[in-house]
Image (cartoon, rainbow, N blue to C red):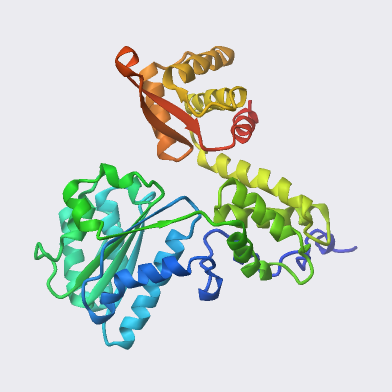
C-alpha cells in the first residue's frame, strides 16, 4: 500500500529559496540596507563620540512606518559597539519596543535585563516583582560595572504612557546616578508631532539631534526588493514583478515593510495556484491581501462597538471620497445606525470619543483639531488611514 504522505507534502518549494528574507522581523545584513546612506551617516555622526568613551548625542528620529528608522538605529548601534571594541571601549546597546513595554517599569526592566551579565555583576533582574526605583538602581549598578558607554533605542517612543523614563535616562549622568558609564538615547517615533507633547525639560535633554526619515521612492523600493530577491528561486520572478510592486507601494505609502509583504504574498499566490513564475498580475492581488491581513491583525481582539465605530468611518469615507475627515457627531450618527441594524444598544458619545482615540493611538485613524470660530467653537475630525474598502470588508466578513 503506498504511503499516503508521499504526495501530501511538497518536499521542495518551487517558488521560495529562502523565504525568511521576506519576513518583516528579518534584520538584513549591511549590504541589504538600501536608500538610507545619508540617514545612516547622520546618525553615526551623532553617536560617534561614544567610540572614544564620550557621551553620544541624544537623538530623536521621526518618520512614517516602514521608512527604515529601527533598522538604521540598530545597524548604527551595532557598528558602534564593534568599532568601540577595536578602540578598547566597552560599549553596548539596548533595544526597547515601547508598543510592548508601555510603562516606565516595563521599559527599565527590559533595558536592565538586556545589558546585564549576571555572572559578572551578580545582579538579578527579574521579569516582575520589583519597584520601579529598584529596577533603576540595579540598572545604574550594571551600567557602571560593565560598560564605558551604552546606547538605548526606544522604538515607538510615543507609545510610552509618560515621559518619566526619558527624564531618568537623559539626565542620569548629570544627576550622578551613573559615574563610570556614558549614556545616549535614540528615540524613534512615527508621529512628527510627538515632540509637541513632551515635557520641556525632557525635550531640552533628549532632542539634541533630530532626523526625519522620508518615505522611500519607487527606485529605492525597487532596490530594497531586488536586494531580497534571492528569497526566490532563480528565474521564478517575472522581470516586471518587482518594478510593479515598487511603483504600487511608492504611490500609496513608500513603506518598505508593506512592499516586502506584497512581494511575499505574490510568491504565495503563485505557490497556491501552482504557477511556475511570480507574475506581475499577482502583485495587485497580493497588495489587497497584505492590507487585509495587516488590518485584521490590528483589530484582532477588539470589541464589537470598537468595530462599529470603524465601520461608521469606513462608510462615511466611501460615500464622501473627497472629504478629508469627519466630525465626531457625524461618525456617531452613522455608528448609531449600525448599532440599530445589529440590534445592539449604542454607547454614549463620550465612550465613542474614547474608542476613536484608541484607534488613533493604533494609527488606524488620524485625528485633527479644528476651530469653527466663535459660532461653533473647536471640534475634532477623524480620518481613516487604512483603505476604507479593506476596513469595510474585514469588519463585515464575520457578520
Total numbered badges shown on the rendered structure: 0
Q: Residue furthest right?
A: 1
Q: Position of residue 165 (x, y in %)?
A: 22, 53
Residue at image point 36% right, 67% down: 43
In the rendered image, the quadrant that contains the C terminus is top right
Residue at image point 31% right, 69% down: 46
Query: Residue 210 lies in what quarter of the image?
Result: bottom left
Q: Is residue 3 above or below residue 82?
A: above
Q: Is residue 286 above or below residue 263?
A: above
Q: Is residue 257 above or below residue 2?
A: above
Residue at image point 42% right, 65% down: 39
Q: Position of residue 114 (x, y in %)?
A: 32, 66
Q: Residue furthest front?
A: 373
Q: Position of residue 320 (x, y in %)?
A: 58, 23
Q: Is residue 317 left or right of residue 192?
A: right
**Residue nearest the viewer, comparing 154 with 196:** 196
| Whether residue 139 is visible | yes
Residue at image point 74% right, 58% down: 241
| Whether residue 135 is visible | no
Q: Is residue 386 left or right of residue 235?
A: left
Q: Is residue 321 left or right of residue 58?
A: right
In the rendered image, the quadrant that contains the N terminus is bottom right
**Residue nearest the viewer, comparing 311 with 51:** 51
Q: Position of residue 269 (x, y in %)?
A: 75, 52
**Residue nearest the viewer, comparing 11 with 283:** 283
Amino acid at each position: 500500500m503506498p504511503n499516503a504522505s508521499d504526495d501530501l507534502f511538497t518536499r521542495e518549494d518551487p517558488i521560495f529559496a529562502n523565504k525568511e528574507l521576506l519576513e518583516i522581523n528579518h534584520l538584513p545584513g549591511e549590504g541589504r540596507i538600501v536608500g538610507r546612506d545619508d540617514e545612516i551617516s547622520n546618525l553615526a555622526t551623532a553617536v560617534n563620540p561614544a567610540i572614544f568613551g564620550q557621551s553620544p548625542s541624544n537623538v530623536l528620529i521621526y518618520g512614517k512606518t516602514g521608512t527604515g528608522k529601527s533598522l538604521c538605529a540598530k545597524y548604527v548601534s551595532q557598528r558602534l559597539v564593534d568599532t568601540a571594541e577595536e578602540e578598547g571601549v566597552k560599549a553596548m546597546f539596548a533595544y526597547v519596543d515601547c508598543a510592548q513595554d508601555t510603562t516606565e517599569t516595563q521599559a527599565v526592566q527590559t533595558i536592565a535585563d538586556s545589558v546585564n551579565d549576571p555572572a559578572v555583576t551578580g545582579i538579578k533582574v527579574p521579569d516582575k516583582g520589583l519597584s520601579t526605583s529598584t529596577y533603576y538602581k540595579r540598572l545604574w549598578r550594571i551600567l557602571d560595572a560593565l560598560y564605558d558607554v551604552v546606547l538605548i533605542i526606544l522604538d515607538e517612543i510615543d507609545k510610552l504612557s509618560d515621559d518619566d523614563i526619558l527624564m531618568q535616562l537623559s539626565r542620569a549622568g548629570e544627576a550622578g546616578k551613573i559615574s563610570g558609564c556614558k549614556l545616549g538615547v535614540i528615540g524613534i517615533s512615527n508621529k512628527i508631532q510627538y515632540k509637541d507633547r513632551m515635557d520641556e525639560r525632557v525635550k531640552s535633554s533628549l532632542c539634541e539631534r533630530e532626523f526625519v526619515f522620508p518615505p522611500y521612492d519607487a527606485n529605492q523600493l525597487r532596490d530594497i526588493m531586488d536586494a531580497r530577491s534571492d528569497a526566490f528561486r532563480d528565474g521564478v520572478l517575472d522581470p516586471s514583478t518587482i518594478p510593479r510592486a515598487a511603483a504600487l507601494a511608492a504611490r500609496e505609502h513608500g513603506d518598505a515593510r508593506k512592499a516586502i509583504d506584497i512581494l511575499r504574498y505574490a510568491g504565495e499566490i503563485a505557490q497556491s495556484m501552482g504557477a511556475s513564475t511570480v507574475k506581475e498580475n499577482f502583485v495587485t492581488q497580493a497588495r489587497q491581501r497584505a492590507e487585509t491581513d495587516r488590518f485584521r491583525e490590528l483589530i484582532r481582539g477588539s470589541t464589537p462597538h470598537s468595530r462599529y465605530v470603524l465601520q461608521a468611518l469606513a462608510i462615511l469615507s466611501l460615500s464622501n471620497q473627497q472629504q478629508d475627515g469627519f466630525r465626531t457627531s457625524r461618525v456617531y450618527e452613522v455608528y448609531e445606525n449600525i448599532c440599530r441594524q445589529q440590534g445592539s444598544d449604542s454607547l454614549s458619545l463620550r465612550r465613542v470619543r474614547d474608542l476613536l482615540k484608541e484607534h488613533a493611538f493604533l494609527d488606524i485613524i488620524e485625528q485633527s483639531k479644528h476651530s469653527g470660530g466663535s459660532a461653533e467653537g473647536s471640534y475634532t475630525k477623524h480620518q481613516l488611514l487604512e483603505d476604507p474598502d479593506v476596513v469595510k470588508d474585514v469588519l463585515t466578513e464575520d457578520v
